[in-house]
Image (cartoon, rainbow, N blue to C red):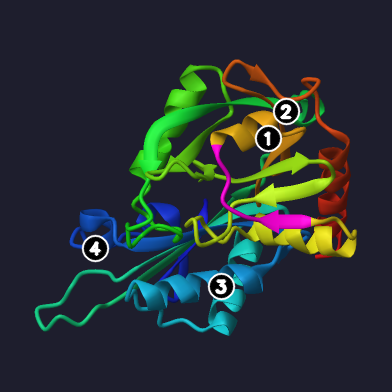
Amino acid sequence: MEQVFLNGEIIEAQTAHIPVTDSSFLYGIGLFETMRAVGGRVFRLADHLARLNASAKALAIRNRYSETDITVAIDALLEANTLTDARLRLSLSNGPIQSDGAPSSNLLITAASYTPYPKEYYGKGVRVILTDYRQNPKDPFAGHKTTCYGPRLMALRDAHEKLAAEALWFTTENALAEGCLSTVFLVRQGTLYTPPLSTPVLNGIARKTVLDIAAKENLPVAEQLLQIDDVLKAEEVFLTNVIMQVLPVVAVEAHTVAEGKPGPLTCRLMACYEQELKSV
């Protein structure tokens, strides 16, 4: 039976429950982290927890568990489910709001076998579309990985219905932001381009990994505001998140990126990212 960690205990998933008055269920006020375990250890766990705590502080979501508590809980959960290579999800909410206004947080961690994206996505690349939805820089949730995720899933569903792997978001000011589930990188004349965090975009863990790799490989990087013309003029485009890793994009809507196949710098970063995973 699948085991989960809920509020200090590892229990069977079927018996786990949270109150119907939970703030995340009622109002979408919560945070989550999707993590990758390799060989029984979580890739860049410290970065995930730093992002979680920063967002919790910014959005007044109480986290009563220390990084050590969560690390111990994840180790125990992987062991309980006999998993080494896994996809984990950590969900944190303020729980039900008490009559005195004091929050009582809920922390849920789940683990499942890691299932990669299809191999052909990496060999041939994928197509993405542009969503008509817009990312609002004035939204207090922007740049945070919150459980208010419906619009992202709607845009992703539209992409899948159009036989695309992802949908790219732009801000209300028409700046390139991110994918529904991913960070966007462009390549032009050997330089990596990606929107700055202030766009705002999520401080992605895979994004940080790619930037660290670029520094090690002496690859020039520019974090700057980008427009649709930058996307269409790019020699290479790729997406990142901790599950997809580095995913090449060969078409944006009906536009073919360069020669319509994964570019050399993207392939180089794909290999470097794999090496980073092996070092966990």
Point 77% across, 29% down: residue? 119
Q: CA distance from mark 3 to mark 1?
A: 25 Å
Secondary structure at badge 2 equals helix
- For label 3, the crowd category at 10 Å Cα-Cα, with few meaning under 14, some 14 to 19 and many 20 or more, is some
Q: Residue type at mark 1?
A: Tyr
Residue designated by label 2: 121
First of labels 3, 1 by sequence position:
3
Q: Residue type at mark 3?
A: Leu
**Tag 4 and tag 3, C-beta contact below 8 Å:** no
Q: Position of residue 155 (x, y in %)?
A: 42, 32
Q: CA distance from mark 3 to mark 2?
A: 29 Å
Q: Residue type at mark 2?
A: Tyr
Residue designated by label 3: 49
Residue designated by label 4: 22
Q: Which mark is residue 251?
A: none
Secondary structure at badge 4 equals loop
**Tag 2 and tag 1, C-beta contact below 8 Å:** yes
- For label 1, the crowd category at 10 Å Cα-Cα, with few meaning under 14, some 14 to 19 and many 20 or more, is few
Does 124 sit above or below residue 73?
above
Q: CA distance from mark 4 to mark 2?
A: 38 Å
